[in-house]
Image (cartoon, rainbow, N blue to C red):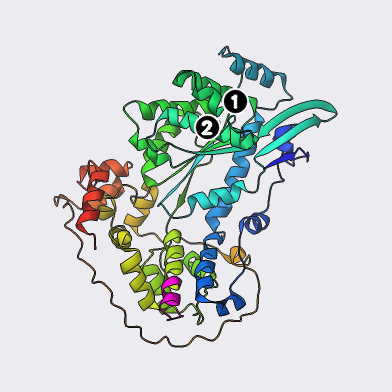
Amino acid sequence: MSKRAHYQPSPVPEYTGNPLIEALPPILSEDDAGAAMANFPPTPGDERHLSKEVRLHLVNRIRSLVQPLPIHLELESTISSLLRSGYVARNPMRPETMRHLYGLSTGRNSSTGFISTASTTSLTGLSGMGKTTALNSVLSLYPQTIEHVRYQGKEFVHTQIVWLKLECPYDGSLSGLCHAFFRAVDKALGQEDRYASRYRARGGIEEMILRMTQLASTYFIGALFIDELQHLNRAKVGGQENMLNFFVNLINSIGIPVVFVGTNSMVKLFADVLRNARRACGHGTHYFQEPKADDPTWDMLVDVALDYQWVQQPVELTPEIKDALYEYTQGVTDFLVKLLMLGQRYAIQAKIETLNPQVFSHVFNTKMRLLKPALEVLKSRDPEKMSKFDDLLPPDEILNEMLSEKEPTLSLDMLAGLRRSKPDTRPAAQPSPATPLHDEPSRPTSRMATRPAEQPASALIAAREDTRSALIEVGWLASDPLEFSETYAVANAP
């Protein structure tokens, strides 16, 4: 979305007199940010009386539900700061900025005295925990492009790209990233194939990187968001280093903040960037951790989600319903949405017209059976078992927290107030009749790799700063996690 620049003075002195910052939306309070990111689609109401064929389509509406959580507010505040601070050293009203841009556009790397103010951050967590949804919610608060004409009475004709989001190629190749970058620029400008076709037809990797550098500086890209960064683990020899060096160059030499998004297996890649980028640790890491069964965030999520029942006998959030939902999702938000959608589809088609633990059990064992091996490991909360699935192994600080059994605390009063107030039109909860369903018996888990018994491994891991090295030392971390994961999934397939 593009808009005409409208400048508002910033209360932060470092941002004053910078059109790239003053054209951005104002800095939001937590209340305003939470309200802006929330999305509560219409609840069913009278739609429960529609035909089953129609209701089977309406259950898809739950996909668009967005209930802001504390992690959303933290992410919004981080990106708000990251965008603006990255522009501080790139003020186009300063002569030194224009000299630096000229050097980049001509490919001359002569010293211009440019000192980057860019930083970086990362979003990591299990697949399905809502990282991309949260990021998209934050980015929706900003126009992607801004058209400048005049600033403070002076001519300033310029197109500013506030943010650019692209996915790391599946094979982790730098050439694939370059092509994705050109396509994303074309999309942001609303000009199909302006750059993508031009730079695809000529030049090698070095030429494309040079063109990316020139475009990033010419359009004053506010921040670059790289999703699915775990794909970089598949890069050929030397590919990881080349791409990480490219990111470091964007941050340090051009001054563009870079945000990395991916599953847990990308954490070590991100750590490499932190060690090499001079200003890359300013905004830390945001870990989307799956909530525990007694976590207040889980209560909030399931309570909101159960407002979206198209069965004719909707149920309230009882302890039995809550336990069943957690049992078959382990707090993963994407699994929760799928379980509620598939549960309602089954209940409507089978003319049960209500949700109960038996319905959820049947759906999980028939429609979600491929998730069972990973969920069993996740349910165990055992670092030894989780280490066999590379993407399930959490970052070091979370792993150490698990080993020391610390309990996180959250305050959700403000976020709970975001929910729209509406009269409770749902019927009182009634005991659900027993539903004769034929659930498949759960299979026993496969034999896991045994660890050395010479000393308590948990004590050794907790005492080491490098948790992953300790896991390898005690024999908990497989040399090829991907190969083990595939073997384990096949052995435990229903």
Span shown in magenta: 345-354
Check the image and report above or below for 331 versus 22: below
Q: Which residue is mark 2?
A: 181
Mark closer to the chain start, 2 or 1: 2
Q: Is residue 12 left or right of residue 138?
A: right
**Which residue is most to the right?**
153
Q: Residues within 10 Å of mark 1 (few under 14, many from 20)?
A: some
User: Is residue 349 highlighted in magenta?
Assistant: yes
Q: Is residue 224 visible?
A: yes
Q: Which residue is mark 1?
A: 215
> What residue do we see at 48% from left, 77% from top?
317
Q: Is residue 46 left or right of residue 303?
A: right
User: Is residue 305 highlighted in magenta?
Assistant: no
* The disc label shown at residue 253, or none: none
Q: Secondary structure at mark 1?
A: helix
The image shows residue 49 at horizontal and vertical percentages of 57, 80
> What residue do we see at 22% from left, 47% from top?
484
Q: Quadrant of residue 478?
A: top left
